Image (tube, coloured by chain):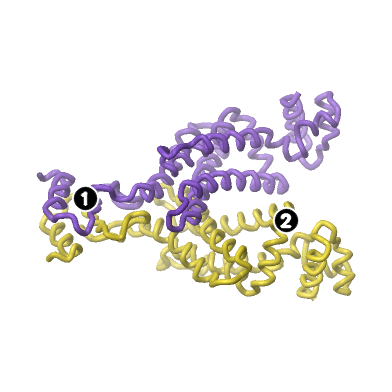
Chain colours: A yellow, B purple
Amino acid sequence: MREALVAAAFQLFLERGYEQTTVDDIVALAGVGRRSFFRYFPSKEDVVFPDHERCLADMTAFLAASDKEHEPVRRACDAARLVLGMYAENPSFSVQRYRLTKQVPGLRAYELSVVWRYERALAEYLRGRFTGRPDGTLRADVIAAAVVAAHNNALRSWLRSDGLGDAGAAVDHALGYVQKTFGRAAEPARAPVFISPAPEGYPDDVVVLVSRRDAPLWRVVQELETALGRA
Amino acid sequence: MREALVAAAFQLFLERGYEQTTVDDIVALAGVGRRSFFRYFPSKEDVVFPDHERCLADMTAFLAASDKEHEPVRRACDAARLVLGMYAENPSFSVQRYRLTKQVPGLRAYELSVVWRYERALAEYLRGRFTGRPDGTLRADVIAAAVVAAHNNALRSWLRSDGLGDAGAAVDHALGYVQKTFGRAAEPARAPVFISPAPEGYPDDVVVLVSRRDAPLWRVVQELETALGRA
């Protein structure tokens, strides 16, 4: 019944436009009563995004099931992948909805509020993990926003390409940038001297060495010689 | 007249609530006609955020007036400071509006759409600056989201504290985190060997040295000795 209502709604949205379609039109086509519609969907907007509530619940449960062993930035990225999974489950429906959402300001506003709820779920998780760290809430909010922006950059490219190509690989690449940018903050220097991955934007032919100020110079030079391949 | 309408509207919103106040109530209190209201404000929501359109226009103009000499991440942060300026101009009005917005879902949705427009303005500017760079649009979108999240983290703390404290210093600190995180990406290693600021999350007692693989080892050691203060 729920699927029939979604299918009827989209058929009418595409035929006559979103604004011109009423809930009465949708239930007439689906052959059910108005009360059935409102049992599944609080409003006409909700039928356009039928799976976000489930996906938000899945994300919240996934984050709640985290433990201290999970690197927090990586965990937030994995949570964002649940959203991609929902879109990738049904590419043609996702592409249709993307086109519809671009045309109807009310649906764009609805989508922004959904995105905001995902972002808050990620930020709440990260705030919990960063409790007691300097600037914990700031880092949590910025990283949550970065995860959402990277995910949506890849998702929208995929939707604009009509759902062709590998959405998973594109999102992995985008989230990889976020992990590379922020993940290091989660693992401060433990060894007195170590070679770090080059930050984003640096050429590939550089070596980045991190040393405690009190490390013996011979240890630093040794590490460096090994890294430069000139031992 | 515009200010009188805003003042009348807020007086009524606070007295009887936002939903219970009509445009007719507002114009009656302000002593003007309905048409005057709609000359200034397309809808009742707009009277709650009377300065965002001007601020968006200021931001767009500020970004359009950028040149190649401006470090792009810093420039985006400076653009975000224009929004803070608007809030800080009138703290008590901003705090009242913050409380009202938290209570009324329709206003929260409106605010999300305004925030989205700021974020898009910043992202468009950064996309232009990063044209031709690998992952240019991804970086632009992520950095724009990070700037907005950092700005709003500091702004909301200030609003929650009833507009006490130094909003400018709080926002500078938050944007400083974003600049430190992403700013480096904009200046890849030019010298064959140099000492880089320690990334976020690293202890203060570390030295970070960046070296091209083909730099002579004596140059690297020399740089390191200087940095460690043991020349």
Whether marks 1 and 2 lie on the same chain: no
Asked if the residues shown at circle 1 and circle 2 are in contact, with their CB atoms under 8 angstroms apart, the answer is: no
Q: Under tag 2, what secondary structure?
A: helix
**In front here: A51 or A95?**
A95
Q: Is residue A127 something one can see in this rendering?
A: no
Q: Is residue A132 above or below residue B31?
A: below
Q: Is residue B54 left or right of residue B66?
A: right
Q: Is residue B141 above or below residue A157?
A: above
Determine the residue positioned at 50% across, 49% down. B127
Determine the residue positioned at 89% across, 70% down. A28
Instruction: Tell me the quarter of the picture where residue B59 sits.
Output: top right
Tell me the quarter of the image containing the N terminus of chain B.
top right
| Residue type indicated by callout 2 | Gln
Q: CA distance from mark 1 to mark 2?
A: 52 Å
Mark 1 Cα shell of 10 Å, populated few (<14), some (14-19), many (≥20): many
**Residue A101 location (% of width, % of height):** 70, 58
| Residue type indicated by callout 1 | Val
Letter of the chain that mark 2 sits on in the rendering: A
Q: Is residue B115 left or right of residue B149?
A: right
Marking on residue B193: 1
Residue hosting label 2: A103
Q: Is residue A57 above or below residue A212?
A: below
